[in-house]
Amino acid sequence: MAKTILTVDDSASVRQMVRFTLSDAGYAVIEAVDGKDALAKMSPAVNLVITDLNMPNLGGIELIRAVRANPAYKGIPIVMLTTESQDSRKLEGKAAGATGWIVKPFATQQLLAVVKRVLG
């Protein structure tokens, strides 16, 4: 059965590019427009979350904290996919519980390599 990835970004074009890349590689993809939408779509069936940092309603750091606060989702890897590359932001993400960090724009091979690494 295909691994399920929840991708969270307020940019429709970024969601589309991530969906195409992951779907072509055989993953099932659920899309969310922001952190609030992602929490509504979160379930134990999700194997990985890929989230943007800066989003309306609920940003990436807040989303990570909310997911990590739920014991049912404790082991789910979360990768940040964002234009932010400052060490301070990466440390903030890691402190919140992020598993990895990819800076936009990204190469499809880079995204797939990270996904394969965190999913084992």
Image (cartoon, rainbow, N blue to C red):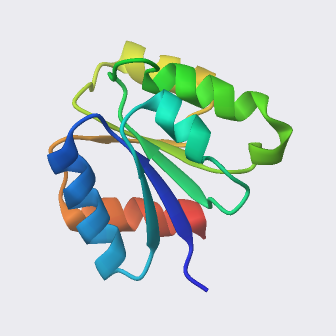
- Vertical placement of 48 versus 58: above or below? below
How many numbered circles are shown?
0
Q: Which residue lies furthest to the right in this view?
A: 71
Q: Residue furthest bottom?
A: 1
Quarter of image, res 95: top right
- Residue 100 image offset from top left, x and y in percent: 48, 43
Frontmost residue, 87 versus 5: 5
Q: Which residue lies furthest to the top in this view?
A: 88
- Residue 50 image offset from top left, x and y in percent: 44, 47
- Vertical placement of 74 versus 2: above or below? above
- Residue 114 image offset from top left, x and y in percent: 41, 59
Residue found at x 48% / y 36%: 37
Residue found at x 55% / y 28%: 63
Quarter of image, res 74: top right
Q: In this view, does 92 lie to the left or right of 47?
A: left
- Residue 16 image offset from top left, x and y in percent: 22, 57
The quarter of the picture where the C terminus appears is bottom right
The quarter of the picture where the N terminus appears is bottom right
Q: Is residue 108 left or right of residue 89?
A: left
Residue found at x 48% / y 30%: 35
- Vertical placement of 113 versus 106: above or below? below
Residue found at x 61% / y 50%: 77
